[in-house]
Amino acid sequence: MSEPPVLFSVTDGVAEVVLNRPEKMNALTPEMIVRLARTWDEVSADSSIRVAVLTGAGDRAFSAGADLGRLTPLLTRARPAEDEWDQQLLDEPTLLNRAILRTDGFTTPLIGALKGIVVAGGMELALACDLRVVGDDSQLGLVEVRRGLIPAAGGIARVSRQVPSAWAAEILLTGERITAQAALQMGLVNRVVPPDEVLPTARALAAAMAKNGPLALRKVKEVMLRSSGRSLQEGFTAEDDAIRQVLRSQDAREGSKAFMEKRAPRFTGA
């Protein structure tokens, strides 16, 4: 049997999610959307998962976005449902948003390990990542306007918050791809490395983050999401809500105790 188009594994508290359709540049099909939504639900519900890494199989592309022969015609109703995956996507309108992480409720830290082409829906998935490691030969872009569409799976809202407005406007309105170096210059990615170092670099970041308190990690991300675009006072309120929960945790006590005893903390997420 062939491998599924989305792979999922967990090792030492780090989840790894792989878009596994390299022969089609990991273009997103209805089946992949359904599987991704289920995967993120599982990651979110598992408190033992401290960090997740999202990547794509093969060297050509992290993802070229939606499969224009399968996903887009289904969503525009240009074709009817042809299998169980199509039908599930039509029956559950929230699946697409959950798959593309178009939500502020996913608080597990997520690292994108991005090689090759990162465009359209693939770019929107990349923008949902908290940290991004890209190959030095990668090209990134929100190209939807060139197809008469808009990046409405989180692309417009996210890129306009993550880079200065002039850069965001150029990315969104020209639909042109940018280089990895340009993305680094504008602060859109964290690391630019040779392609064969992308996944190892992302895994090293994930391993370092996984040593931290899992509740603290999720609460930091939660506050970042809640305070984005809000007033400073609203940000302070989000911090207050989070710290009250963190201070009541066993991990907060363990962190202080481990520091005093000069040893590595043994966090449990409780």
Image (cartoon, grey):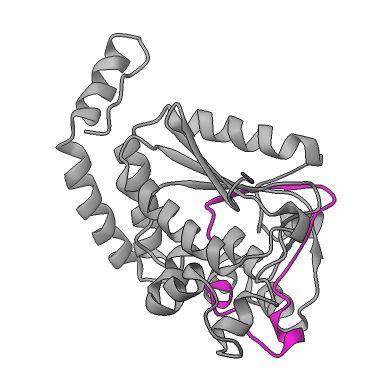
- Residue for point 35% across, 71% down: 231
Query: Which quadrant of the rendered structure holds the C terminus?
Result: top left
Check the image and report above or below for 207 versus 50: above
- Residue for point 80% across, 41% down: 195
Residue 227, quarter of the rendered image: bottom left
Check the image and report above or below for 114 versus 252: below
Q: Which of 176 and 18 lies nearest the eye of the viewer?
A: 18
- Residue for point 22% across, 40% down: 246
Query: Which quadrant of the rendered structure holds the N terminus?
Result: top right
- In this rendering, the count of numbered labels is 0
Side of 62 where 84 appears, left or right: left
Could you tell me residue 258's position as x and y percent?
29, 15
Could you tell me residue 50's position as x and y percent?
40, 37
Residue at the left extreme of this rendering: 248
Residue 119, quarter of the rendered image: bottom right
The reply to whether residue 243 is visible in this rendering is yes
Check the image and report above or below for 189 versus 231: above
Q: Which residues are magenta?
A: 128-156
The reply to whether residue 117 is visible in this rendering is no
Assess whether residue 143 is covered by the magenta stretch: yes
Q: Which of 169 and 106 lies nearest the eye of the viewer?
A: 106
Side of 242 where 264 appears, left or right: right
- Residue for point 58% across, 73% down: 155
Q: Which of 138 and 250 lies nearest the eye of the viewer?
A: 138
Check the image and report above or below for 128 versus 242: below
Residue at the right extreme of this rendering: 137
Side of 205 where 219 appears, left or right: left
Could you tell me residue 87's position as x and y percent?
45, 75
Could you tell me residue 163's position as x and y percent?
62, 66
Assess whether residue 153 is covered by the magenta stretch: yes
